[in-house]
Image (tube, grey):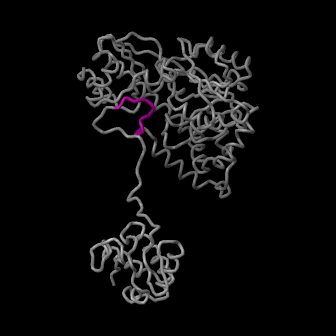
Amino acid sequence: MTPSTGPGGPPGGAPGSAAGSAAWELLLPAASAPARARGRALQEALRDAVRSGRLPPGTRLPSSRNLAADLKVSRGLVTEAYEQLTAEGYLRSGRGAGTWVGDAVRAARPRARDLAPRSPADRVDFVPGTPDLSLFPRSAWAAAQRGVLTELPHESLGYPDPRGLPRLRTALAELLARRRGVVADPERIMVVSGVAQATSLLAGVLHARGTRSAGVEDPGSPQHHALYAAAGLDTVALPLDDEGLATGPLYASGVRLVVTTPAHQFPTGIAYSARRRAELLDWARSVDGLVLEDDYDGDFRYDRAPVGALQGLDPERVAYTGSVSKSLAPGLRLGWLLVPDWLADDVVERKRTTDLGHPALDQALFARFVERGDYDRQLRACQRAYRERRDALVAALAEHFPGARVTGIAAGLHAIATLPGRHGPEESFLARVSEAGVAVRSLAAYGHGGSAGARAAQEVRLVLGYAHLSPGRIRAGVARMARAL
């Protein structure tokens, strides 16, 4: 029995048409489903046919008697399916007028889109921010997952403490105190889905307390404006000097919240001097303010031991945040936030109302990963790989761009390269290397207030991410840039 199309209906469902026959064939598997599931299967098959457009709006369906005979099912099963889908709006019917596909339904999209950032395989991508995802420790992670699933009590799968599982907060307190010199009280650690959520939580709490603006480093992370705007805060761009955030403009700005990356400033690559770190804390105490320390890659220093976190000097004036996005993978969406005691309760409550806590299984898994030393081993492996890649980048620049200067400390996942003036102007340089299949950003792209620092008119300053590229790919990319010129 083939569905037909009534007056004004689309031609695709006309009697005997290929579209009508193909749509009706979708119901045959439902008719052969187990007896108890047959009614539900028939309803779902009808819904799918309408949603997908295989049964277009205006298509007249066979009578329940005829359809039941064709499918060799009971008439009551078909009648119940028609009544259910009519109640839901997929079908319409009238006394003596038969059953039709309703006009309210629109064909569903055929597939879900993937909006995750991707770089074409034929391009060499020096845009910073991504670690080498092939270094993710799959075997160790899988072993930790098996162990957790074996040992985790049933009650641990309920709604967690919004701060995070005590086991993970305890493991993080030990890890951050040992590796980053943080004053880490497990009661003031919060497990979050990355630095972005940590920033949003803190900004929301401070907005509720009357804060209306946040100072951000200039140049700095391009995400700050959107994150703080979502919490109702304006951002004030604050310039840097050779030692870190310039304190004169900071005092003059009137802000009482400032976001910093003191261990390895993003993107300039400098480390705040000891004097500037002390001056920043003096500012916070004098204005009753707060410093948010984003320690995004503090574990990765290649020429010496990393400088300890600013938070260790004054835990009541510094909130501290970090994540596994650079050490494991950003897709894990796992990070931490340490807050001063005077903010802790408000931030915990906002976390509770935002998402009821981070996934318990993920937390238990990472806690085990830290406790067994797997995370330390992963950091050492990344350290070796990224140091080798930075060395490869410096050597390739020296070979293909004589006179180029690499500035900033030997740390992190990116470097600043200043090319001689003969390669400028910068806009022309960027256009040419892009045409050659190299993705790269200039330092100016990270300026918030239009000041990425003074430079010569023809000078080209690039922010080169290298962690996600093999040494061979780095050398090939730098050579390709040189050839493009």
Residue 307 in picture, x, y percent from top left: 58, 20
Q: Is 284 within the magenta?
A: no
168 displayed left or right of 422: right
Q: Quadrant of the N terminus?
A: bottom left
**Frontmost residue, 423 versus 176:** 423
Residue 393 in picture, x, y percent from top left: 35, 22
**Frontmost residue, 92 versus 69:** 92
Q: Quadrant of residue 256?
A: top right
At a point 73% along the width and 19% down the height, the residue shown is 287
Work out whether 95 lies above or below 372.
below
Residue 226 in picture, x, y percent from top left: 54, 34
What secondary structure do most residues of the magenta stretch adopt?
loop
Work out whether 164 lies above or below 315.
below
Residue at the outermost left position: 483
Residue at the outermost front position: 7
User: How many circles with numbers are drawn on the protein?
Assistant: 0
Q: Which residues are magenta?
A: 125-134
286 displayed left or right of 460: right
Q: Quadrant of residue 11?
A: bottom left
Q: Quadrant of the C terminus?
A: top left
At a point 40% along the width and 22% down the height, the residue shown is 442
Q: Is 132 within the magenta?
A: yes
At a point 44% along the width and 86% down the height, the residue shown is 64
